Image: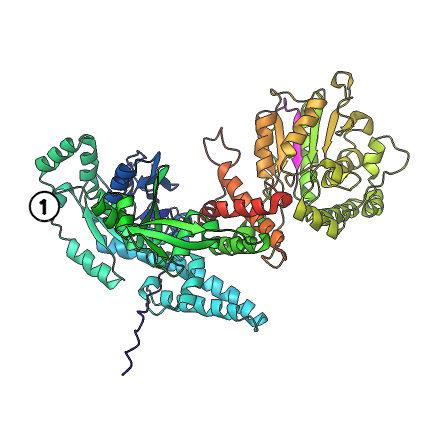
Amino acid sequence: MAPKKKVEEVKKVKFGRPGNTLRMGLVGLPNVGKSTTFNVLTKCSIPAENFPFCTIDPHEAVVNVPDERMDWLSATFKPKNTIAAVLRIWDIAGLVPNAHEGEGLGNAFLSNIQSVDGIYHVCRAFNDEDIVHTEGEVNPVRDLSIIQSELIFKDLAQATNRAAEYAKKAEQNKKMKELKEEYDALVKCQKILESGKPLRLCDDWTSKEVEIVNKYQFLTTKPTVYLVNMSERDFIRQKNKWLPKIKEWVDANGGGPIIPYSAAFEMEYQECGDSEEDKKAYLEKTGAKKSMIDKIIKTGYDYLDLIHFFTCGPDEVRCWTIQRGTKAPQAAGVIHTDMERGFICAETYRYEDIRELGDENAVKAAGKLHQNGKNYEVLDGDICFFKFNVSKGKSERLSSLLSKYEYAVDVKSSLDYVCCRDIAVPLDVPLADDIDKVLCLGANMVETPIYAAQIVAKRLEQNPRRPLTLILSGGIGRLTPLLCDNVVAWAKKEGLTDLVAQLPTGGVPYQSRLKGLAQTEELKPVKEEDAIEFSRHGYKSRDDLEGFLTESNLYLEVILGILVVKEKLIDYTDICIIDRHSAVSFDKNSFSGKLIVVLENTSTNTGNNVTHTKELLADADLLSPESRMAVVDIPYLGRRALATLAWHFGPLVAGFEARMPPVLLNYPEDFPTLPDRVLGIHMAAGELLRLAKYSIGSPQQRFFDRPEDFPRSLYQQVVEAEPLLNEMRRILGENVPA
């Protein structure tokens, strides 16, 4: 009789996709002890005042995950560096009822939760008349229900909107099976949430559905560890009237670890001294059994079903984090994507074996070192050495990296946020009368030079005796032909007939008159194929732009049309134009006019617009660090230039944002080739990173305030996937801008 076939255990599919760095968010109502708990967990001090919303932006800190195996391995191998597994903890400001409708500080907090891998849900189980409770009286079961309801409402709004979006797409593209699958998964989410249940409570998800749902980072899919903050007295005697009711509620709502602790006790425990003797004496004095901090940190890891493997050698002993069930190639990929792509085998032995036998040589001699293939499932405590060989072509490597990046980052949503925004700032902004430079940057929008002309007019009116320098910076990009069409349409509306007649063929009548030319200078109009080529590959030097009708030329035509032709505020004789060919011969001491125009045909696409502009100003002897500057800019791929130019050329007086109509870019449809798709994700990632970088610090240090709708979860995805983008850029060489 044939032996029975072994039935493989069906593994339950899990939500989430935490990487080597785990992020946990501290969530709860105001004044339940989140910030105090955060201070204890991270041993750092942030405000913990007794009023709601003392935490407005999520404070983040990094803590080592306790693992005695790591300590022993480090002592045994004596490496130059020891790198432990870390846990990133975010202190997220307190939620209130109806936060999903904007109550309290509203949706921003819910968005913060979206970017974490798991949740520490802090609930208050102590009475203290000195610490107010926003709901009037202490009732942790009610508080738990409030938070869960807010998370469900937020998820339901997202599922409903996304389902409606995919219903249209599925109807229009009936042959695309994946659109129907996406729609069905979202409808399933919608029905579960409408029933008042969190998504993690449903246990009949398929692996395909989980893959789809993971993309949206629904709040109610996130594993939750419940932290019950008790009084010191209750913690020491290990009794509290609310614990049975909390356990009953948690079991009825999907289950999860419950850790009773006292934030007040833990704070005093940390302050009693750094030595083990001091801490032991404090425990004996109070009658408490132990601190709960290590358990809180470790439970966050364990509940997400994460395990550790180690790499050990004379240079480094390091702990790596993977989800339980990860195969050897994917575990190697946590270290470096090349190791997964070129995986050959994994040499592994168990921590228990080296601990018992003493060293690596003894492990090998005892036959405990195993060579495993691609189907090997890495176990908790494995010590691994991966063998790999990378020899595949560029295209295949790039395609593999792109797939990983698109799995890690919601590129379409990032592009939508970066490009599809309608932003306007009023003109009536005070200008210092000692300003002597106005920098005009643009993104293919005629509104930007119009706005710059208004700023110049205002400055000339304030201080007509002092010459003003106008810097125009712009080259050729994907939307340059659109800018030309917009300028022609604007000129027609304003009655500038010579501009309407000559610009489509490359004529620049106002610049020609400024240069004193008898006939209109003819420049080569930028065709769509030229724009795509420049956008895709960039340009190595400014010589590549010679003879083209660049964005700088178009900006100048608009500004001259307003200042000289329409408003007649100045004459051509009051203006001097400088480019890289004439800068050295310019003598500012003999200039008696009102406006110096610096024409710089470059842009952020080269990655060196700051260098070029600075060199040009230096050649013309116009680079003075004490000068003051106003900047006219738009959000789309220009903020980095705004910030760095301000640092280089003097204090920033004001940054003006002209109106930017939405730019519709469909990913990946508008990026057909592999290099195009890398350019698309570069555009999406770059602006999010710059928004975050230049909007931090004090009001004097930052260049602008971070938008209220800043997508923190998308930003976190971009930050963590940046090594993938850098690797793709390395493969493509100069084809993608820095």
Q: Residue furthest bottom?
A: 1
Q: Amino acid at mark 1?
A: Arg
Looking at the image, the residue that sits furthest to the top is 589
Q: Secondary structure at mark 1?
A: helix
The quarter in which the N terminus is drawn is: bottom left
| Residue 378 figure quarter | bottom left
In the rendered image, residue 87 lying in the magenta stretch gets the answer no
Q: Report which quarter residue 261 is drawn in.
A: top left
Left or right relative to 380: residue 661:
right
Which color scheme does this rendered protein use? rainbow
Q: Where in the figure is residue 309, as x and y percent of width and height?
A: 32, 49
Image spot of residue 152 (x, y percent): 36, 59
Q: Nearer the viewer, residue 401 or 705?
A: 401
Which stretch appears magenta? 432-442
Q: Residue at x 60, y 30 (%)?
A: 645
- The one nearer the camera, 331 or 622, is 331
439 falls in the magenta region: yes
| Rendered position, 235 above or below 428 | below
Residue holding disc 1: 237
Looking at the picture, how far across and down is residue 706, in whole percent?
Answer: 49, 40
Q: Residue at position x 13%, y 52% from top?
A: 241
Between 494 and 582, the residue placed more toward the observer is 582
Would residue 39 appear left or right of 489 to someone viewing this image? left
Q: Is residue 268 left or right of residue 587?
A: left
The answer to whether residue 17 of the structure is visible from this angle is no
In which quadrant of the rendered image does the C terminus lie?
A: top right
Q: Position of residue 570 (x, y in %)?
A: 78, 29
